[in-house]
Image (cartoon, helix red, strand yellow):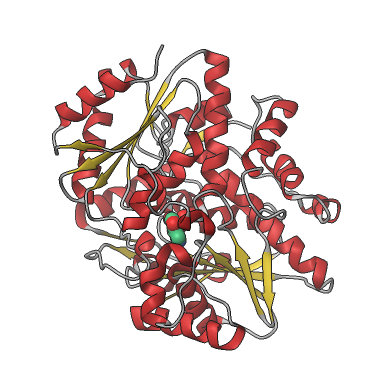
Amino acid sequence: MRYKSTRGQVSDLSFTEAVLMGLASDGGLLLPESVPDVSEHLEAWQSLSYPELAKNIMGLYIGDIAAAELGGIIDKSYSTFTNEKVTPLNRMGETNILELFHGPTLAFKDVALQFLGNVFEHILKETKGELNIVGATSGDTGSAAIAGVRGKDNINIFIMFPEGKTSELQELQMTSVLDANVHNLAVDGSFDDCQALLKSVFSDLPFKAQYQLGAVNSVNWARILAQIVYFFSAYFQLKEEQPQTNKVDFCVPTGNFGDIFAGYLARKMGLPIDRLILATNANDILARFFKTGRYEREEVNFTHSPAMDIQVSSNFERYLYYALDGSSAKVNEFMESFANTGAASIEFNTPSFDQTFAAGSATNEQTLAAIQEIYEVHGYITDPHTAVGLHVGKTLRRTEVPIIHLSTAHPAKFDAAIKLALPEVHPVHPTLEALKGAKTRKSKLEVDEDALKHFIKKHRAPE
Ligand SMILES: *Cc1c(COP(=O)(O)O)cnc(C)c1O
């Protein structure tokens, strides 16, 4: 499989080239040249374990890592999950919840970042290179990225976070990792300051090349690829218990559009997904788009589901490319209009589009009510991101098609929101309990590009 950019100026990349490039060098996003149809394999794949399923699906998209090597990378990536099904489907009456939070940091991002870390390690072994990953986090992504590469040879990771503005637990999940290649940078500023610093070091191209800077942000193709697998796994788990299952809907709490885009590709590959239900919190630019065709930026709202407090979704352009008939010219025009005016529109002129996606949003109150409802009915505690999906799924469900809800984090990670909904309930997880009182390490950083560069130079991976 070869890869190309949505903007049309980059093409014919191998998988590892696409992984190392991250964001396409023409400013677009990388996509496979074609999407394989796997309909005829569905029956044979039904009984595969998660890692075997992953090898079959991901192997179709990876032409430059030998099958045995890829198999080893996949086995290693999912051996860190504490549930034998990796992403188990929890069925409670009519409610189906796909638990994606059994990895090391208890959020669904582990599914992709455990894999990406091992892919980086493999590539560096082949090229004998070094990699210095630089990232900015407002909470969740940082710890999953760190868990993906901690202790690995020839890789260093530098994660900036706004000092005092992440939750105590989120900070602990990062700073308690004491491996020598992990550098937590507590920035004396806001998350926007961290992102601006990140942008400025990446735009210094000579510096980026000299220090082999790399990124693990949500646009990396390897992350999308790893996430396709659990849509298949969920479908097979439901079919195992309900053999008459034909089509299913998936409900996906959405921020950067990565998770739901993986579902879109699974559908294109022939998995019988009827609708993808897109659920947002008050930051509802995507929900509005799928109702009206108009993509229009607004101010960011802070909600109980902070990992979805996003206005401009970094993976949306991948979907746009397909929605605009694979025309890079139209993608460029749309993105330019959006960059210049804060808004752009698309005609939903082909009958298939408006039927693939259904969309809705949940207010903070509706999110808390959804946490209360599933606890009252099933005694199940769910995190606020998952609860956004539960609310939206309820408003859009049809009796004849089952819905599978993606659950993106363990509730103990977001205990403050749970406390508001269920004052008497205290979700805990042994992984998080073990962090309390743990030894930590972090370095202070001023909002200053030269200070960041100096830090990277001093702590870079050995050549
Ligand atoms: C990142 C994240 C999301 C949003 O996923 P996207 O792929 O950005 O749409 C939802 N829930 C949690 C807990 C997350 O960490």
Considering only vertical position in the picture, is 405 above or below 172? below
Q: In the rendered image, which quarter contains the N terminus?
A: top right
**x 47%, y 53%: residue:** 434
**One can see residue 15 in this view:** yes
- Looking at the picture, tell me which residue is in the foreground, 209 or 438: 438
- Looking at the picture, tell me which residue is in the foreground, 154 or 423: 423
Image coordinates of residue 54 in percent, x first then y, are: 70, 44
State which quadrant residue 29 falls in. Answer: top left
**One can see residue 330 in this view:** no
Considering only vertical position in the picture, is 145 above or below 266? above
Image coordinates of residue 346 in percent, x first then y, are: 39, 62
Image coordinates of residue 269 in percent, x first then y, are: 68, 52
State which quadrant residue 283 falls in. Answer: bottom left
Tag count: 0
Does residue 159 appear to the left or right of 197 in the view shown? Answer: right
Does residue 243 appear to the left or right of 28 in the view shown? Answer: right
Does residue 419 appear to the left or right of 164 in the view shown? Answer: right
Image coordinates of residue 190 in percent, x first then y, are: 18, 51
Q: Quadrant of ligand 1?
A: bottom left
**x 36%, y 54%: residue:** 170
State which quadrant residue 356 falls in. Answer: bottom right
**x 58%, y 39%: residue:** 115
Q: In the rendered image, which quarter contains the C terminus?
A: top left
- Looking at the picture, tell me which residue is in the foreground, 254 or 38: 254
Considering only vertical position in the picture, is 23 above or below 369? above
**x 26%, y 37%: residue:** 198
